[in-house]
Amino acid sequence: MPATAAPLVPPSAPFPGEHINALNAVLGNASAEQRQWLAGFLAGYAAAGGQAGVAPASAAGKARPLTILYATESGNAEALAGKAQAAARRLGFKPVLLDMADASPADLAGAQNLLVIASTWGEGDPPQRAAFFYEDLMGAGAPRLEKVRYSVLALGDSAYVNFCETGRRLDSRLSELGAVRAAGRVECDLDFEKPAAAWTETALAALAPVDGAAAEAGAEIIRVDFHKEAAGLWTQENPFPAGLVQQIELSGSRSTKHVFHLELSLEGSGIAFEPGDALAVLPENEPALVEEVLEKSGLAGEEALGRRLLGELDITTLSRPLMESYQRLRPHDGLARLLDGEDWRGFAKDRQLVDLLEAFPARLEAGELTGLLRPLPARSYSLASSPLAFPGEAHLLVGAVRWQSHGRARAGVASTWLGERIRRGGAVRVFLRPNRHFRLPADGRTPVVMIGPGTGVAPFRAFLQHRREQAATGRNWLFFGDRSSTHDFLYQLEWQELAQDGLLTRMDVAFSRDQPEKIYVQHRLWEQRRELWAWLEEGAQLYLCGDATAMAADVESMLLAIAADQGGLDRDAARVWLGDLVRGKRFQRDVY
């Protein structure tokens, strides 16, 4: 390439002489458009802190449209979508965020480039807010999407058999509808930050426009880094040590359950939350289980390893990836037969790592054992207090979980640690998980209906405290249920006080074991259907918190029945009515 007649890079530039000559050789023969692109690239590179990653679109070119569609329950998918949007914008895209709760499949027909970030809930279901979009996309009326290029990020929890099932089905369905997969699906477990960042980088690179100037320049690209957090922000990697101030068992001595009220000090943390948010807790495993895992691994007495198993690594989850990794380390014919078909599902159901080590024994090295395990995941608990009523504090309502399966006693990791093993004065490692989809109405005059059986009542204690502190005038109706009124009426005295003060307009309770027939909150909804329908017609907001497996589905089925009975709606119309409540943020759920 001939040298430029007028060097653009002066001899005083901070480069070796041979680099100056090379730069002049390239820039002296570059077009104005190429120089403009390079100037934009270097500016973006500097803004990103000198990190390499996806090539930005040509500065001279038109921004490339990008739709980022997300399905979220607890907020993780939404947060990742926001980070992907910021990365895409920096790289020259024109990204638009779209919540499945506010979208229909028709919205995708005009999308050229599509990123989908979807969580899986429960046993392979989509998040509740995305349920109507999901059903429509899977239905016969979904539009063809031949002009769409896409990639899917699937979020899940490998503790569940149908790991990342929603993301898998969305990926498959988009392909069936004619969309072109630009980058392969990535599936993430609970430690999703690094794989999500890598997927974002790869997917944006695949969707980036083919830019001749960029290709000719061979430009490096800006890396996507989701681990760069604001200073002072508490995270799973950097939790706040909250002091345990109070620990009170609320369930009676003859109750079949053990439910605890905990008060944590957030003084000095700077954590600012709203009612409806959750506090994530990093727990510790049960010491007896840690000792048994060490013994069955041939590692008894390894104190340093025991400390890691106690507070850092997940020893209760048994997933197919873990079983496959174990089989590669210590092959066993019986385990191979399980993994060859679907029998592994039956084996893994309600079993843990210790069962695998017992059924297929082998001695492991310490590094081999830790290599099998994922980080100990945080557990989230709905905040049961208002920051206006209890500044500098966070209250939690925790039901200790214990059960028997396959001849072995089992225990919930976080619930038994918080309720039974940690004591007042101890430190609980926490960080905030905001939930902007479970919020009190901005207008304090709006009536609210709260459905919270068992520990699902926790956020509604915070709601009512907050409304009292704000002098909100809207009516408040609480549906609460549990097993026994004598032993399981959580926060009974507080509800009575709120009722006497006039803040709690009415309360309907269902205690399933106080009479021969089982009565649950959905039965109370049906009994009060006329007045409930009137409240909803007047604009009341409806909230549901608690068990996702059975209770939430039963309540929603009852709401559809009430819409049919009181509103005269057929099945399809009732479904549309409930969907409109969800999309209008008048029906909000926090289920687990």
Image (cartoon, rainbow, N blue to C red):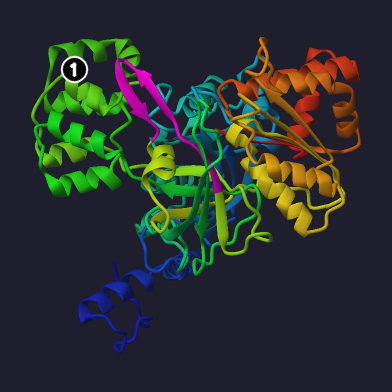
Position of residue 502 measured from the top left corner of the image (x, y, whole percent): 85, 47
Who's the residue at 35% across and 18% down the image? 405
Judge the density around disc 1: few (<14), some (14-19), many (≥20) Cα neighbours within 10 Å.
few
Where in the figure is residue 147, as x and y percent of width and height? Answer: 59, 31
Residue beneath the point at 26% across and 44% down: 310
452 on left or right of 393: right
Splitting the image into 4 quarters, where does residue 378 fall?
top left
Give the amino acid at mark 1.
Answer: Ala
Q: Which residues are magenta?
A: 396-412
Q: How many marks?
A: 1
In this rendering, the answer to whether 92 lies above or below 75 is: below
Q: Is residue 342 left or right of residue 102?
A: left
**Looking at the rendering, in which quadrant would you find the N terminus?**
bottom left
Residue at far front of view: 253
Tell me where residue 428 appears, x and y as whole percent.
41, 54
Could you say which quadrant of the image residue 7 lies in? bottom left
User: Residue 92: in sight, yes or no?
Assistant: no
User: The C terminus lies in which quarter of the figure?
Assistant: top right
Between 190 and 464, the residue placed more toward the observer is 464
The question of residue 407 being in magenta is answered with yes
Residues 79 and 98: in front is 79
Taking the view exactly as shown, the residue that stands out farthest to the bottom is: 12
Which residue is nearer to you in this view: 514 or 105?
A: 514
Q: Assign the magenta stretch its main secondary structure.
A: strand
Which x, y percent locates residue 103? 69, 35
Confirm whether the magenta stretch covers residue 529: no
The residue under label 1 is 359
> Which residue is drawn at the image coordinates 21% and 77% (left, top)?
18
Q: Secondary structure at mark 1?
A: helix
Visible residue check, residue 413: yes
Q: Quadrant of residue 575?
A: top right
